[in-house]
Amino acid sequence: MEWVSKMNFSKGIFRAYDIRGVVGKDFDINFAFHLGRAFVDFLKCKTVVVGRDARVTSNEIFNELVRGINNAGADVIDLGECTTPMFYYTVANESYDSGIMITASHNPAEYNGFKLTREEGIPIGLSSGGSEIRDLIGQDYSSNSKGTVEKYDVTDEYVEHCLKSITKIKEFKVVVDVGNGMAGFLVKKIFDALPCELIEMYFDVDMSFPNHEANPALPENLVDLKNKVLETGAELGLAFDGDGDRIFLLTEKGEVLSGDFTTALIAKTLLAKDSGKAVVYDLRSSWATKEMIEKSGGIPKESRVGYAFIKKLMRETDAIFAGELSGHFYYKYNFYHESAIITALKIMELMCSTNKSLSELLKPLKTYFQSGEINKSVENRELALAKIEEEFKDFSISRLDGIKVETEDYWFNLRPSNTEPVVRFTAEAKTQEKLDEITNKVLSLI
């Protein structure tokens, strides 16, 4: 672990998309002051929007971060505790020149972190300014506070913005599990404006996560929601992550919609009003997603995994929408940022306009056989990828993100994790036999 003087932090917390680590191990509270100072020095920004989740360390981190920002001469717009989509919306809609969200998203309670943005909420990742900010940390600073702090509650404005994304929703019974994270108060306000029955699960904010981790991408964290949907006869189940920027949906039968299928359904409804536009999807998505975009009159655009890459591609292609397997869904209407709430509303609107249940909407997409994402621990990730590339050198190979091999009968993607010593494998095939064959072959080779 490499440490920088004046405070404890590991350079490894600066990741492809954000900054994240265990507080007291990977970075200390004092790090936040130096980050705030370096952030302003790098961007030369005048105002920084700062939001935070409710983790036990978030208030202390906020205080030090603001002190650093003010010390560098910039003002702070304090959103208080909020979801990450509310934070992005504020930076973009109010035309502020930068922002920092204090959150570790879906990570366990001991983690915390920072999402950094430029104007319009454009992400700052490791390769787009993060490394430069990291290298500025540790300098000597004056102690004269120069900036100001102004509180700003964006909740009602954001609720109105989300509700404007739909026309009409009928009466639904909906179970919502927010995992004791940040989304509960926002969900309540949204449902107050809808003719729906809301059944709440784990709405008390407690980011020690006493019931289950607030990571809906893991099946074990959806068990309680599935049981409640079946028990209550609800038409829909919604699961949010810790900072409220990701969502997974369950049908009335308790089936989980994978992120690529949710992408396909929302692309269909958006393209009905905006045909000919681009839709971005991550390269782990099913063939069915691309096919749905094309059938609906859209232009499919494949992207690397990760919100920094997807938002960049959306702007470059003027895409109206993008979706990731991980449960992030992005809207041009929402300044190219993700919104879990808008995603739930658009699916409910689709159910109304088609007069179909979610399981009926899902059925035509279940054409192929999928592996899901499989993590494999390896000592040398680069060597593992090179070995697979050599084995499949006679096939079509994309190097957009790791390697993706595609044939008429199957495709698979193998990419290194940005955060763990693992490679992530995803595959799809036209038959279960072919899926089993290619999965076993690749995993055995690495």
Image: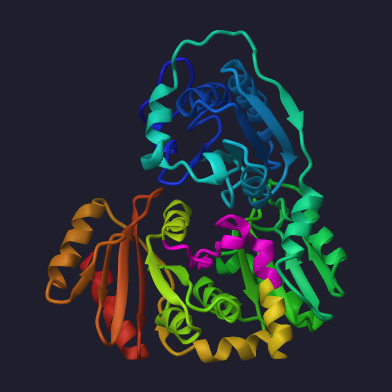
Q: In the figure, is residue 311 to the left or right of 246?
A: left
Q: In the figure, is residue 326 to the left or right of 313?
A: right
The residue lying toward the viewer, choosing from 400 and 43, is: 43
Residue 273 falls in image quadrant: bottom right
Question: Can you say whether 385 is above or below 125 in the image?
Answer: below
* First to last magenta residue range: 317-345
Residue 224 seen in the figure? no
Is residue 342 magenta-colored?
A: yes
Quadrant location, the N terminus:
top left
> Where is residue 173 shown, x and y percent of the image?
81, 78
Q: In the figure, is residue 427 to the left or right of 111?
A: left
Question: Can you say whether 144 is above or below 283 in the image?
Answer: above
Q: Residue at x 50, y 28 (%)?
A: 39
> Where is residue 35 shown, x and y percent of the image?
52, 26
Question: Can you say whether 45 is above or below 341 in the image?
Answer: above
Q: Residue at x 66, y 19 (%)?
A: 147
> Where is residue 25 shown, x and y percent of the image?
50, 31
Q: In the figure, is residue 101 to the left or right of 416?
A: right
Residue 446 falls in image quadrant: bottom left
Residue 152 seen in the figure? yes
The residue lying toward the viewer, choosing from 92 and 140, is: 92
Colouring used for the render: rainbow
Is residue 278 magenta-colored?
A: no
> Where is residue 445 shown, x and y percent of the image?
21, 68
The residue lying toward the viewer, choosing from 243 and 109, is: 243
Residue 109 falls in image quadrant: top right
Q: How many marks?
A: 0
Q: Residue at x 72, y 61 (%)?
A: 162
